Amino acid sequence: MRAIANYEQPRKRIEELALADSACRAIFIEGGKDLGKTHLLDFVRETCGINFIVVSLGKQRATPSPKLVLDEIAQELGWARFPRLRGAMRGRSLRPIQASINDVTILGSHNSIEAIAQETEEDRLIEALELTEHLIEDLRVVTCEIRPLIIAFDHYDEATSLIDGWFSRSLVSSLCRLDHIRLIVCGRDVSRTSLKGKIPGARFLELGLEGVRNAEHWLPVVQYEGLTIPFTTYEEKIAFLTAVVEINEGVPGLIMSQLRWLCRRKGRHV
Amino acid sequence: MSEDKSIGKGENAHRAGLLSHLLEDTQDPTLEQKLEWLSVPHWIDGRISLSLADIPEAPSQQFIESLAADGLLECWNDGCLAVPSAVRHLVLSRMVKEKPNAYARLSKVYAELFASATSDSGDAFDYVEHIYHKLGANADACADLLLQAGVGLLSEPLYQFDAVERLTRYGRELGDLVLLPPEVADIFRFMGIYSRGVNGLLLSDLDVIEEILSREPKSQLFRAELFLTLGWINIQSASVERAGALFQRAREQFEALKVLRGEADSIRGLACAAISSGLLVVAEANARLASKIYHELGLHNSASHCIRLLAGVARGRGRLFEAETLFDQALEAFLTHSGHMSGARTRLTYSEVLASRGKFKVAHQHIDRASRAFEKVGDEAGVAECRKSRGVVLFEEGRYLEAREAFSDALQHLDASRSGATSAACQLWLAACEIRLDRSTVAVALLEDALTYFNRVGDRAGQASALRELGLAALRDGSTHTAIEKLEQSAAEFKAIGNEVEASVSSIALARAVITAQFPTPYTVPEITALANSTLLVFEREGLSGGIEEASELAKEVEQLSSSSGGTSGLRKAVESRSFQFRVGPQIPRIEVADYIELGRLVAQWTTEPATRPRDVGELKEQLDGIAVVPDRIKSVKFVESRIDHLVLRLPVKEMLEESLEEMTDPMGDGRYKLPQFYADHYRPGFGPAMTPLDTLLARIGDYTIGQCR
């Protein structure tokens, strides 16, 4: 089972969100770079036995578009649950688009990012809004075994302006209107977005991640990762971990980078 | 959004120590160099990793795999590997500072690798990464390349906004890492403006572009693009003359560079400027020329904008029948390419033309659909423009109180600094309502404001319209001589810009003023008779029933006047004869189809999914909302289905068939049979929208299922 250093409170809040009678509809998780947001989501998804899907809006070679995000949600839950969305997507068949720039041929439809290359971002937003209606209709009738369902969007700060417009104009409020759907939006500066105003009844929580400064909390992670701390006694190991945690101010991403580097076999990468 | 906060100055001090820790702790003397190889690109995928294997000093695949296995490289959802951004930033900062030549050399290698990847994949994101490395290798030499990449990705047919958003982010990243040449930095700024498109340009962009121009960019292509964009901003701020000059400069530069797309865009700009100045012949010639070039380049969407311009020209000339056809054609073209917003804007002007031809229901439906589109994307200015068009339709219906409300509402919501022309038009229309509601005093103040605007921007059609309303206001106030003077000016101005319909409307008003003033005026009875005759001809030609009615009434009045004075004008005979000959359209209302493709889609659905069929006329109208208008004469509906072994011959309504036969064989008819527009698009695909085989099939299904002896 995947390990995590502490973050007990955020984990609990997410698990509570998954309760059928939860009054809360959404959680906004904010934390600076390397504070372990993605790891937290992955950990809860893998270990808590709740219906939970995570869609990344960043960290991909091709920027995710609304169509790609919808596609990912449907794929995660199984396309059979999304007959309306599938029909609507099928109706927006790709047209071959290509153009030569500086003698290089670029294919507009290569990434299947948008159904069709529209001339303005607003046109794409309208397409996204229309597809969202179909998604919501399908989600409205999803079967009991996946209720309640948490849909988490990670790396929100890396999303394009189109995704931002789509979330604030439609997706967030539409999802939160469904009793059995819960939403998590995760990113570096989520608190500054206007999304929260879109949650009906302001039924949302804000969680801030601040790192893990207790060295002992890192022991399960070291064990899970199979890292060998170059000391023998427990006290020495804790002192070592304390130093690493202190140097990196409790920031999980940095701590892990350094631990992986320091605790592996010397000279391995040649 | 999308700003990578990790890449920037002012990182926390503790992060800076991380790289030193990592490097000091290793026994591998080449580790730093290997890390540099992996940190220069934002990501590597399998293809790039394989290419690196051919470069001796590059890290081996085994090394890359072991780093990934140890979690020292991020593995993204799509399988790409990346050095964690904190580490990457530290490596690059150090490299640029201490080994700038090595950074440039690796950037050059990756530029080639990603160029080759783009050639294989055609992928815009590979291409953006290629441009990023070209800039890293030698930004001084890449101004034109960057500009062509940005404009090429943002323009038709690619419209890769997300890729350019990333390229712009890379620009910020490079700007933090290395000192970008001012011209390259300016190109990145320009791309931010350009990516918003013509309708998204702001007045504040004007300062930015002028500031860039003041630095006299070396790249002629950049100067041309700047002139072009500046031209569009000037059109929006109603500095039409300046806009025209800028478009002309842009055109000359693009022409010299043999950049056809830019040349066509500039010519299209010239057409817009000419329309705003009332130079309709110039506008038409330019719109046709731009369309021809777009067509040669295969840029159908841009060509559709030219069709819309031509529709505007036709409208400006009062050729409403032609305008209607062209607007219809432009709308269909935009919708074919999911150009919802251009479609919405087209619907608004189209609705006004339809209203002036008495097609109020369809006009309202177009406004409803446009309004929904603007509301969906939160375009408040667009919603306000919908209110203005709604007002125009209501006005044409004679619902002046409601129209007044719509125009007032529009004025409140319009941003006058961005929508000066629409605001002035609203003032004009609002004044027209006030005059018809006997509130001429209020109207005059509004008209004077509007006229000031029209005079400032040189909008001759606006000036002529405002003069007409001022004349009508004077007439209401009993100042008949002022009224005659204004109305004469109005009619003359409309004639000068070639709009015979509007000139006729002003002439009718002039005739009324003359009659009210009682003869003798500068006009004699025969002159007014001739005037009524000529206006009648114009209204007939354009099928304007309201105008025909007005001209006929005027003729009757003049005839009475001449009878009482003992003269005979022969006017009655002429009017009666023409009224008999002229047909506004079929007497039995037909189903008006706005979107044949959608109609066909619906018919296909009714066929394959019987449960979706409407159960009564109410449901039918509901389903056809925005697609077609079902006339009130239809009280019930029945679905009949052919079978493989049973042919159903659905015969037309006898009365309608007879009416259509009579109309088509009438020797006094207009000699035209109007096929739905999509047939023209199918047979002449160059000029209109590109109809896919499916579009054509659906449109035909829609047409033959619902067609009723048209």
Image (spheres, grey):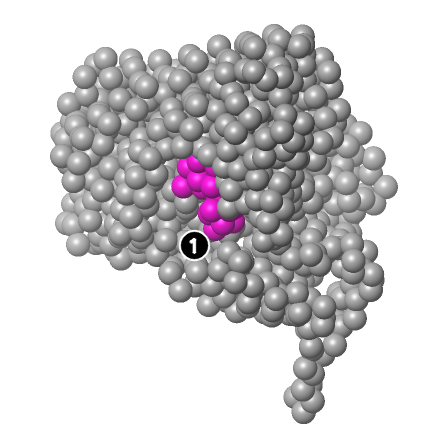
Q: Mark 1 Cα within 10 Å, few/some/many (few <14, many 20+)? A: many
At numbered mark 1, what does the secondary structure look like: helix, strand or loop? loop
Chain under disc 1: B
In-front residue for pair B594/A5: B594
Residue B607 to residue B564: above or below: below
Task: Locate residue B224 relative to residue B672 in the image: left or right.
Answer: left
Where's residue B556, x and y in %?
Answer: 66, 35
In-front residue for pair B531/B97: B531
Name the kind of residue labelled 1 in the image.
Pro
Quarter that holds the C terminus of chain B: bottom right
Task: Locate residue B252 relative to residue B633 in the image: left or right.
Answer: left
In-front residue for pair B196/B407: B407
Q: Is residue A220 visible?
A: no
Residue B330 to residue A203: above or below: below
Where's residue A268, x and y in %?
Answer: 31, 46
In-front residue for pair B329/B150: B329
Report the residue marked by disc 1.
Answer: B689
**Outermost front residue:** B566
Residue ID at (20%, 34%): B254
Residue ID at (77%, 40%): A177
Task: Locate residue B129 relative to residue B503 in the image: left or right.
Answer: left
Was residue B324 drawn as part of the magenta stretch in this picture?
yes
Residue ID at (58%, 38%): B571
Where's residue B195, x and y in %?
Answer: 39, 32
Give the main secondary structure of the magenta stretch: helix
Q: Quadrant of residue B35?
A: top left
Where's residue A247, x and y in %?
Answer: 45, 21
Q: Is residue B520 visible?
A: yes
Magenta segment: B310-329
Residue ID at (65%, 57%): B586
